[in-house]
Amino acid sequence: METGRNETIALHRWAVIAEATDVRLTHAERGVVVREIANRTHAHPDGDQRRYSRNTIDRWIRAWRSGGISALAPSQRADTGAVRAHPELFTEAAALRLELPSRSAAQIASILFHRHGIHVAERTIRAQLHRRGLHRAALVGEGKAFGRYEASRPNERWITDVLIGPHVPWPKTVSSVRAKLFLIVDDHSRLLIDGAFFVHENARACQDLLRRAITRRGVPEALYADNGAPFKNAWLSRTTGLLCTRLVHSKPYSPEGRGKQERLNRYIREAFLTEATHRGIETIDELNDLFSAWAEQVANKRIHAETKETPIERFERGGPHRQADPAVLVEAFRWSVTRKVTKTASVPLEGNQYCVDPSLVGHRVELRFVPEDLSHIDVFFEGKPAGAAIPFVIGRHTHKRVPQAAPDIPEATGIDYLGMVAATHEAAAGTGTKIDFAQLSAFSADDTETGDEVAQ
């Protein structure tokens, strides 16, 4: 039975790699085929839908070349003999797990080895216990208990999040839009490091706030965030990497480590957003001004229920904080993309075309730029500066993922055209004469500024 299963798996693996084994393929063509295979989902003989990495596919191709279809069969586990010869080991493993549910599979394997001199793989024990319903999650219960964690010093760990705020007027839309409050809180002191409302919830909004926060409070050792798009992207990873800050993402559906942020969010809703909504907000700039004042004068100066001191006092007691080199800070918040230089010595970016040094034709180069200004692009080749990309055809001056500022609203002229029509209509109705629309169109600009002559 095992032989038949191994053969089935070998044939399945062959079906996966067959397309890439054509001897007519060049090395580059085979690489393209392998990447396409790795991007597909394959039906496994056990009924599952699986995807295989490029390394796995390359390994199977090498095995087939050296030994044919039989070389694609799964290799026999080193502990298979022990499993078959000593089934009682799993009865003992089950008893060890029931005795102490927190006992790990590795610990159980160690106990069995020292007791019987038989090595059983940790993975085998874990799989057998899971089949019997004795995995630790089932024994401990669904209600996980999370230990309390607190950073030992200021700026050791910052926690960032996005809080949905109130509706604010926005000239680009017919109605108002929902403002998003990006927040950063210090884990040790509970200091509200910084916060700002944005109309767009994207990567650049997160970077803008982080840059301002670092300028004001220093560089954090770690930045803790969820898996949302503003926090899980190549640009933020590059920023934190250049600043020597660890970027840590919380596990999906795991609340541990985010309790302080959630409590702060609740406090902001109750103490600020409720009052701001009641007061009425005319612009997002006004909302940000009010929030900055409230954060500094109220949130950071209140006595915290757990620390028994104000967040600002606890934060400042840590002394001077690590500052970023100005040049590094500028570079950290630039964006970077890779492009291949065309035969005409040009590269595309956001629909624009840029000319680069002709010696770079056919090579892949790195473009570094500030997304708010696409007119200036620096080119790097193999990590070294390679001049600037000169705009050739430019239609966009800012990156499409950059939060756009509200357009300037032109000042009102004071001309009430419909009011003038109505006034003329009333005057005509009183005299019994017909309305002369040609006369309406002949009003001079001076007459229309105040409408005095019309009103008379």
Image: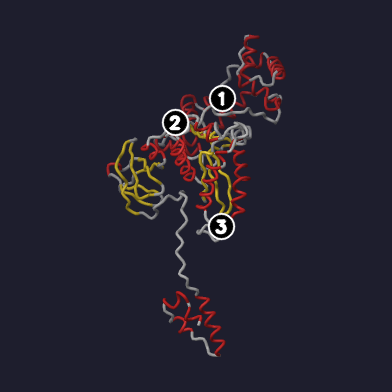
Query: Circle 2 is placed at which residue position?
Result: 320
Q: Classify 443 as above or below 31.
A: below
Q: Quadrant of residue 244?
A: top left
Q: Nearer the viewer, mark 1 or mark 3?
A: 3
- x, y percent for residue 416: 50, 74
Label 3's element? loop
| Rendered image: mark on residue 176 | 3
Q: Earlier in the sequence, mark 2 or mark 1?
A: 1
Q: Earlier in the sequence, mark 1 or mark 3?
A: 1
Label 2's element? loop
Q: Residue at x 50, y 59 (%)?
A: 171
Report the front residue among 346 and 10. 346
Q: Residue at x 46, y 61 (%)?
A: 409
**Labels 2 & 3 near each other (Cβ < 8 A):** no
Q: Classify 381 as above or below 352.
A: above
- Give me the C-alpha separation between circle 1 and circle 3: 61 Å
- x, y percent for residue 383: 34, 35
Residue type at mark 3 is Ser
Label 1's element? loop
- Give me the C-alpha separation between circle 2 and circle 3: 42 Å
Query: Circle 1 is placed at which residue position?
Result: 74
Residue type at mark 2 is Pro
Residue type at mark 1 is Pro
Q: Residue at x 44, y 37 (%)?
A: 239
Q: Residue furthest bottom?
A: 432
* Residue 15 appears in view: no
